[in-house]
Amino acid sequence: MSARSAPAPAALRPMREADLDALMEIELRAYPFPWTRGIFHDCLQAGYPGWVMEHSGRVIGYGVVSLAADEAHILNVCIDPRQQSQGHGRMLLRALVKLACDRGAHRIFLEVRPSNTAAVTLYHSEGFNEIGRRPRYYPAHNGREDALVMAMELFFEGMS
Protein backbone atom coordinates (compact mmCIF):
# COMPACT_ATOMS: atom_id res chain seq x y z
CA MET A 1 0.00 0.00 0.00
CA SER A 2 1.48 3.35 -0.97
CA ALA A 3 0.87 6.46 1.04
CA ARG A 4 -0.38 9.38 -0.98
CA SER A 5 1.10 12.67 0.15
CA ALA A 6 -1.08 15.72 0.51
CA PRO A 7 -0.70 18.33 -2.20
CA ALA A 8 1.60 21.21 -1.38
CA PRO A 9 -0.23 24.24 0.00
CA ALA A 10 -0.47 27.42 -2.01
CA ALA A 11 2.35 29.89 -1.46
CA LEU A 12 2.41 33.68 -1.62
CA ARG A 13 5.16 35.91 -2.96
CA PRO A 14 5.44 39.55 -4.03
CA MET A 15 3.99 40.44 -7.42
CA ARG A 16 6.45 41.44 -10.13
CA GLU A 17 6.43 42.60 -13.74
CA ALA A 18 7.26 39.09 -15.00
CA ASP A 19 3.88 37.90 -13.62
CA LEU A 20 1.75 40.08 -15.89
CA ASP A 21 1.12 37.45 -18.60
CA ALA A 22 -0.11 34.93 -16.01
CA LEU A 23 -2.19 37.58 -14.23
CA MET A 24 -3.85 38.61 -17.48
CA GLU A 25 -4.75 35.00 -18.34
CA ILE A 26 -6.54 34.66 -15.00
CA GLU A 27 -8.07 38.15 -15.16
CA LEU A 28 -9.58 37.39 -18.58
CA ARG A 29 -11.04 34.09 -17.32
CA ALA A 30 -12.39 35.58 -14.12
CA TYR A 31 -14.06 38.82 -15.14
CA PRO A 32 -16.32 39.98 -17.96
CA PHE A 33 -14.75 43.45 -17.57
CA PRO A 34 -11.13 42.70 -16.63
CA TRP A 35 -8.33 45.01 -15.64
CA THR A 36 -5.91 45.76 -18.44
CA ARG A 37 -2.23 44.85 -18.45
CA GLY A 38 -1.57 48.59 -18.19
CA ILE A 39 -3.48 48.86 -14.92
CA PHE A 40 -1.38 46.09 -13.37
CA HIS A 41 1.78 47.70 -14.73
CA ASP A 42 0.77 51.10 -13.32
CA CYS A 43 0.09 49.56 -9.89
CA LEU A 44 3.56 48.02 -9.85
CA GLN A 45 5.15 51.28 -11.01
CA ALA A 46 3.30 53.19 -8.29
CA GLY A 47 4.72 50.81 -5.70
CA TYR A 48 1.39 49.28 -4.67
CA PRO A 49 2.16 46.02 -2.89
CA GLY A 50 0.76 42.91 -4.50
CA TRP A 51 0.81 39.22 -3.74
CA VAL A 52 0.87 36.37 -6.23
CA MET A 53 -0.45 33.00 -5.13
CA GLU A 54 1.19 29.91 -6.61
CA HIS A 55 0.17 26.30 -6.35
CA SER A 56 2.21 23.46 -7.84
CA GLY A 57 4.38 25.99 -9.66
CA ARG A 58 1.49 27.84 -11.32
CA VAL A 59 0.04 31.25 -10.60
CA ILE A 60 -3.52 30.76 -9.38
CA GLY A 61 -4.34 34.14 -7.86
CA TYR A 62 -3.22 37.62 -6.96
CA GLY A 63 -4.11 40.69 -4.99
CA VAL A 64 -3.14 44.35 -5.04
CA VAL A 65 -3.52 46.89 -2.24
CA SER A 66 -2.83 50.60 -2.04
CA LEU A 67 -1.65 52.19 1.18
CA ALA A 68 -1.91 55.84 2.15
CA ALA A 69 -1.43 57.28 5.63
CA ASP A 70 -3.25 54.89 7.95
CA GLU A 71 -5.67 53.44 5.38
CA ALA A 72 -5.45 50.58 2.89
CA HIS A 73 -7.60 49.83 -0.12
CA ILE A 74 -7.80 46.40 -1.72
CA LEU A 75 -7.84 47.19 -5.42
CA ASN A 76 -8.03 43.69 -6.85
CA VAL A 77 -8.18 40.21 -5.40
CA CYS A 78 -8.71 37.26 -7.71
CA ILE A 79 -8.40 33.49 -7.73
CA ASP A 80 -8.43 31.62 -11.03
CA PRO A 81 -12.02 30.38 -11.53
CA ARG A 82 -10.63 26.85 -11.94
CA GLN A 83 -9.14 27.06 -8.42
CA GLN A 84 -11.98 28.76 -6.53
CA SER A 85 -13.89 27.32 -3.55
CA GLN A 86 -10.75 25.74 -2.08
CA GLY A 87 -9.89 28.39 0.52
CA HIS A 88 -7.35 30.20 -1.66
CA GLY A 89 -9.35 33.45 -1.71
CA ARG A 90 -9.58 33.51 2.08
CA MET A 91 -5.83 32.90 2.39
CA LEU A 92 -5.06 35.68 -0.10
CA LEU A 93 -7.48 38.12 1.55
CA ARG A 94 -5.95 37.46 4.97
CA ALA A 95 -2.47 38.05 3.53
CA LEU A 96 -3.56 41.40 2.09
CA VAL A 97 -5.10 42.42 5.41
CA LYS A 98 -1.95 41.38 7.28
CA LEU A 99 0.20 43.33 4.83
CA ALA A 100 -1.95 46.41 5.49
CA CYS A 101 -1.64 45.91 9.27
CA ASP A 102 2.11 45.41 9.02
CA ARG A 103 2.38 48.68 7.09
CA GLY A 104 0.47 50.60 9.75
CA ALA A 105 -3.03 50.77 8.27
CA HIS A 106 -5.84 51.21 10.80
CA ARG A 107 -8.66 50.62 8.31
CA ILE A 108 -9.00 48.70 5.06
CA PHE A 109 -11.54 49.24 2.30
CA LEU A 110 -12.69 47.42 -0.81
CA GLU A 111 -15.44 47.55 -3.40
CA VAL A 112 -17.34 44.50 -4.63
CA ARG A 113 -20.20 43.86 -7.00
CA PRO A 114 -23.39 42.99 -5.08
CA SER A 115 -23.91 40.24 -7.68
CA ASN A 116 -20.65 38.57 -6.57
CA THR A 117 -22.32 36.84 -3.66
CA ALA A 118 -19.41 34.46 -2.97
CA ALA A 119 -17.03 37.40 -2.51
CA VAL A 120 -19.52 39.38 -0.42
CA THR A 121 -19.99 36.34 1.83
CA LEU A 122 -16.22 35.88 2.16
CA TYR A 123 -15.66 39.54 3.04
CA HIS A 124 -18.43 39.50 5.66
CA SER A 125 -17.05 36.30 7.19
CA GLU A 126 -13.61 37.93 7.49
CA GLY A 127 -14.95 40.97 9.35
CA PHE A 128 -15.69 43.47 6.59
CA ASN A 129 -18.88 45.51 6.92
CA GLU A 130 -20.83 47.32 4.24
CA ILE A 131 -20.43 51.06 4.77
CA GLY A 132 -21.98 52.39 1.57
CA ARG A 133 -22.56 52.08 -2.14
CA ARG A 134 -21.00 53.61 -5.19
CA PRO A 135 -23.82 53.97 -7.74
CA ARG A 136 -23.07 52.71 -11.24
CA TYR A 137 -19.44 51.96 -10.33
CA TYR A 138 -18.84 48.82 -12.40
CA PRO A 139 -19.47 48.25 -16.10
CA ALA A 140 -22.10 45.62 -16.76
CA HIS A 141 -23.60 44.00 -19.83
CA ASN A 142 -26.79 45.99 -19.40
CA GLY A 143 -25.41 49.33 -18.27
CA ARG A 144 -23.66 49.75 -14.92
CA GLU A 145 -23.72 47.97 -11.54
CA ASP A 146 -23.37 49.55 -8.12
CA ALA A 147 -20.44 48.68 -5.88
CA LEU A 148 -20.79 47.76 -2.25
CA VAL A 149 -18.16 49.63 -0.27
CA MET A 150 -16.89 47.50 2.58
CA ALA A 151 -14.43 48.30 5.35
CA MET A 152 -12.80 46.73 8.35
CA GLU A 153 -11.10 48.41 11.29
CA LEU A 154 -7.59 47.06 11.80
CA PHE A 155 -6.67 49.07 14.85
CA PHE A 156 -8.63 50.10 17.90
CA GLU A 157 -7.92 51.43 21.37
CA GLY A 158 -6.41 48.73 23.55
CA MET A 159 -5.46 46.52 20.61
CA SER A 160 -2.20 44.67 21.25
Image (cartoon, helix red, strand yellow):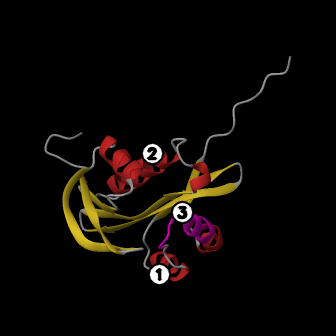
SS category of the residue bearing label 1: helix
Residue of label 1:
42
The answer to whether residue 98 is left or right of residue 39 is left
Of the two numbered discs 2 and 1 in the rendering, the one whose residue sits closer to the viewer: 2
Q: Amino acid at mark 3?
A: Ala
- Visible in this render: residue 153? no
- How far is mark 3 from mark 1, CA to CA? 20 Å
Span of residues in magenta: 23-33
Of the two numbered discs 3 and 1 in the rendering, the one whose residue sits closer to the viewer: 3
Magenta stretch contains residue 140: no
At 39% from the left edge and 52% from the top edge, which residue is drawn? 119
Magenta stretch contains residue 24: yes
In the displayed orientation, state which residue is furthest to the top.
Answer: 1
Residue of label 2:
90
Find residue 66 and report its image quarter: bottom left
Contact between marks 3 and 2 (CB within 8 A): the answer is: no
Q: Earlier in the sequence, mark 2 or mark 1?
A: 1
At 48% from the left edge and 75% from the top edge, which residue is drawn? 35
Q: Amino acid at mark 2?
A: Arg
Q: How many marks?
A: 3
Position of residue 78 relative to residue 156, above or below, is below
Most frequent secondary structure within the magenta stretch:
helix
- Visible in this render: residue 94? yes
The numbered dot on residue 52 is: none
Residue of label 3:
30
Q: Position of residue 96 (x, y in %)?
A: 41, 55
The answer to whether residue 100 is left or right of residue 55 is left
In the displayed orientation, state which residue is furthest to the front.
Answer: 142
